[in-house]
């Protein structure tokens, strides 16, 4: 009804209906995320009346989208560009590690026609080497030289990104049926073997995005493409894929540099076996298709 307004840095008059306010027509000065408005009567003689929170939900155009290749719903990889001029590499986006690396032209990967390799001599934005590194994963290891380069992900250019060029690696990284040119770790600096922030965090630090947020949409069908497929979003979540427009938040520990989330129990076929009775942590890992538990729990 008349006399209602949105209490923001700027106040807009709103229509009589309490149920339908077209926020889009108000041209609100925000970019994605959620806007909460407190609505009250502006007439001084009327008592303020609280209304339900108004939420403006972010759409797909607010984020930078990177389509991912879904290999049998077991691994997900997508394109990034490194160097000047930029060269494309197809990498696994991995929340279970913190470092970005690709195969070096000095490695045996350079002899494989299904892999792309990085040659620092072909890039004008290469800086290095600044050191060496080695990473041991759950299965396999790799190592090489540390450098700084320009990296583009989802159309966003990150300058002086610390990364690795791998000169040696174990055989499990060379899979012809599902080749990838490297790994982009998306965990925290505390777990980084090259002592750096991940690419998304550096986007925020360089003022390229307002918040260091990303999300994964896993389509579930390897043959699906486009919006029905799998992709990585840099920026606010796409509420087209959020059940009931509600996101559940779980606090992460981060003490080990990983996305560690607390667990209270584990159910197997709906039955509780007494695992995690004193509390434990789990790692949501987009770089593996396995569910891994400690040996003590497994034998129980």
Image (tube, rainbow, N blue to C red):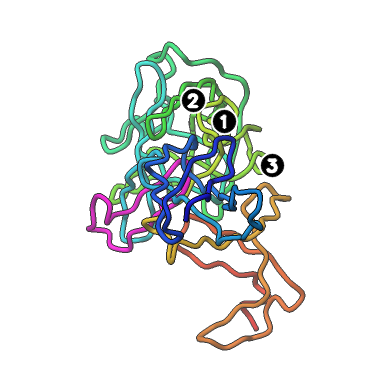
Q: Is residue 69 magenta?
A: no
Element marked by disc 2: strand
- Mark earlier in primary sequence (1, 3): 3
Q: Is residue 285 above or below residue 142?
A: below
Element marked by disc 3: helix
Residue situated in front as seen by the camera: 231 or 139: 231
Task: Give the mark toward the camera: 3 or 2.
Answer: 2
Residue denoted by label 3: 190
Task: Give the mark toward the camera: 1 or 3.
Answer: 1
* Magenta residue span: 216-238
Residue denoted by label 1: 202
- Please report the residue visible at 73 percent of the width from the left and 50 percent of the height from the top: 255
Residue situated in front as seen by the camera: 215 or 211: 211
Q: Position of residue 101 (x, y in %)?
A: 49, 34
Q: Furthest-top residue in view?
A: 124
Q: Is residue 261 above or below residue 297?
A: above
Element marked by disc 1: helix
Q: Position of residue 289 (x, y in %)?
A: 44, 62
- Mark earlier in primary sequence (3, 2): 2
* Quadrant of the image occupied by residue 279: bottom right
Q: Is residue 26 above or below residue 237?
A: above
Residue denoted by label 2: 158
Residue situated in front as seen by the camera: 122 or 140: 122
* Residues packed near mark 1 inside 10 Å, few (<14), some (14 to 19) or many (20 plus): some
Using residue 291 as the reference point, say whether residue 27 is left or right of it: left
Pointers 2 and 1 in contact (C-beta within 8 Å): yes
Q: Distance between the Cα atoms at labels 3 and 2? A: 20 Å
* Quadrant of the image occupied by residue 92: top left
- Mark earlier in primary sequence (2, 1): 2
Q: Distance between the Cα atoms at labels 2 and 1? A: 7 Å
């Amino acid at each position: 009804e008349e006399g209602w307004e949105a209490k923001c840095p700027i106040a807009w008059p709103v229509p009589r209906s309490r149920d339908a306010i077209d926020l889009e027509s108000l041209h609100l000065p925000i970019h994605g995320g959620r806007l909460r408005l407190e609505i009250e009567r502006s007439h001084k003689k009327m008592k303020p009346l609280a209304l339900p929170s108004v939420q403006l939900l972010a759409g797909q155009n607010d984020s930078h989208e990177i389509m991912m290749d879904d290999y049998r719903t077991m691994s997900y990889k997508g394109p990034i560009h490194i160097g000047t001029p930029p060269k494309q590499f197809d990498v696994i986006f991995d929340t279970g590690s913190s470092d970005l690396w690709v195969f070096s032209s000095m490695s045996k990967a350079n002899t494989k026609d299904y892999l792309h390799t990085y040659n620092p001599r072909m890039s004008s934005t290469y800086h290095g080497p600044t050191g060496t590194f080695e990473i041991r994963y759950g299965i396999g290891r790799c190592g090489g030289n540390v450098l700084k380069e320009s990296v583009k992900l989802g159309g966003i250019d990150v300058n002086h990104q610390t990364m690795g060029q791998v000169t040696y690696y174990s055989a499990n990284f060379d899979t012809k049926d599902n080749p990838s040119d490297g790994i982009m770790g998306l965990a925290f600096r505390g777990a980084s073997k090259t002592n750096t922030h991940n690419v998304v965090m550096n986007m925020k630090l360089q003022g390229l995005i307002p918040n260091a947020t990303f999300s994964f949409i896993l389509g579930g069908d390897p043959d699906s493409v486009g919006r029905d497929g799998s992709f990585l979003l840099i920026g606010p979540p796409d509420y087209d894929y959020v059940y009931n427009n509600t996101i559940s938040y779980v606090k992460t520990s981060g003490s080990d540099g990983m996305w560690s989330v607390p667990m209270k129990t584990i159910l197997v076929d709906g039955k509780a076996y007494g695992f995690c009775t004193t509390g434990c942590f789990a790692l949501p890992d987009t770089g593996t298709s396995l569910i891994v538990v400690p040996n003590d729990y497994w034998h129980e």
